[in-house]
Image: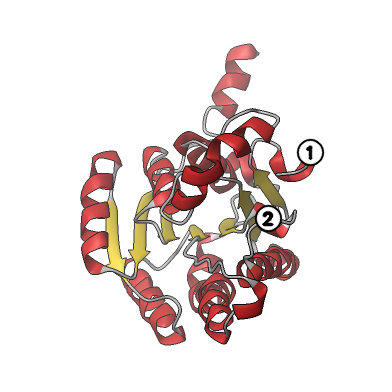
């Protein structure tokens, strides 16, 4: 019986034969996720605004599996549609959509500009919605009752607790993305598509480099687990949500932050 149970559960994290799109997958959290999905057996498309960055990331990730990089400026609706069309041209179905591309803008309240709202909201909130719209036929084609297609939105713990830095449009956009995740989960669940969000804490990335340099040790010291995020932490949650292990989870926002947002104070 024990051997039979082991065999039945051995594929909980196997993504062989799956097709995934990871936006912003050329660096930071996006690359961590792309690498994890590749190592679990998925074929992965990554995107980024910069063509040279795409080429470099594709080269780095190729050792882990079948990966293709497509340059696209996802702050523009037309570019979201173009990327979706290219993905659908290669495969009629899309098993996993990871909406990770994002932007942050830090500036004091008195001088916070209009541009800081438009730039951040277009990429952090509108882009995930536009991509879901454009890729919905491919997601529907991939999903079944036993094995739904997966949408994974990358939110932030800045939408769960109030950070000290003045990131008004970033925190607002991520809070909206968390709620959009719940709204889409309710609508798309009956269509065999799950929608969940991951709220990362502090991970090594270009976006967080200045914060880590300035107060990284302090943040780690105040976290219950006493450290910052590592590559495998983000790869692991993505593989869990994308695999059979996560097939009965939808509408959830999962903080991956060592406990900072939900248990620590003064961070």
Extreme residue toward the front, this view: 110
> Splitting the image into 4 quarters, where does residue 192 fall?
bottom right
**Residue for point 43% across, 75% down:** 74
Location of the C terminus (image quadrant): top right
Extreme residue toward the top, this view: 2
Q: Is residue 102 visible?
A: yes
- The spot of residue 106 in percent (x, y) is 56, 66
- The spot of residue 77 in percent (x, y) is 46, 85
**Which of these two is toward me, 85 or 208?**
208
Q: Which marked residue is nearer to the observer: mark 1 or mark 2?
A: 2
**Residue for point 71% across, 37% down:** 259
Q: Which residue is mark 2?
A: 164
Q: CA distance from mark 1 to mark 2?
A: 16 Å
**Which of these two is toward me, 108 or 250?**
108
Rate crowding at label 2 as few (under 14), some (14 to 19) or many (20 or more) other CA atoms within 10 Å: few
User: From what the image shows, is residue 81 above or below residue 252?
Assistant: below
**Which of these two is toward me, 251 or 126?**
126
Q: Which residue is mark 1?
A: 263
């Amino acid at each position: 019986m024990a051997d039979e149970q082991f065999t039945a559960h051995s594929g909980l994290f196997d993504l062989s034969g799956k097709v995934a799109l990871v936006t912003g997958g050329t660096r930071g959290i996006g690359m961590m996720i792309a690498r994890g999905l590749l190592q679990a057996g998925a074929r992965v498309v990554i995107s980024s605004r910069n063509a040279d960055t795409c080429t470099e990331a594709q080269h780095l990730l190729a050792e882990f599996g079948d990966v293709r990089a497509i340059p696209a400026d996802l702050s523009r609706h037309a570019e979201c549609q173009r990327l979706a069309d290219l993905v659908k041209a290669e495969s009629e179905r899309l098993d996993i959509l990871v909406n990770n591309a994002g932007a942050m803008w830090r500036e004091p309240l008195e001088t916070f500009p209009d541009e800081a709202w438009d730039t951040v909201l277009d990429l952090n909130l509108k882009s995930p919605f536009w991509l879901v719209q454009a890729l919905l036929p491919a997601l529907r084609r991939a999903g079944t009752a036993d094995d739904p297609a997966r949408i994974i939105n990358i939110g932030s713990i800045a939408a769960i607790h109030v950070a000290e830095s003045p990131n008004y449009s970033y925190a607002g956009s991520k809070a909206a993305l968390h709620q959009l995740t719940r709204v889409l989960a309710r609508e798309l669940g009956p269509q065999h598509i799950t929608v969940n969000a991951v709220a990362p804490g502090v991970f090594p990335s270009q976006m967080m480099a200045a914060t880590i340099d300035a107060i990284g040790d302090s943040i780690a010291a105040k976290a219950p687990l006493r450290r910052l995020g590592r590559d495998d932490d983000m790869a692991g949650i993505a593989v869990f949500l994308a695999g059979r292990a996560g097939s009965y989870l939808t509408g959830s926002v999962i903080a991956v932050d060592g406990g900072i947002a939900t248990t620590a104070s003064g961070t």
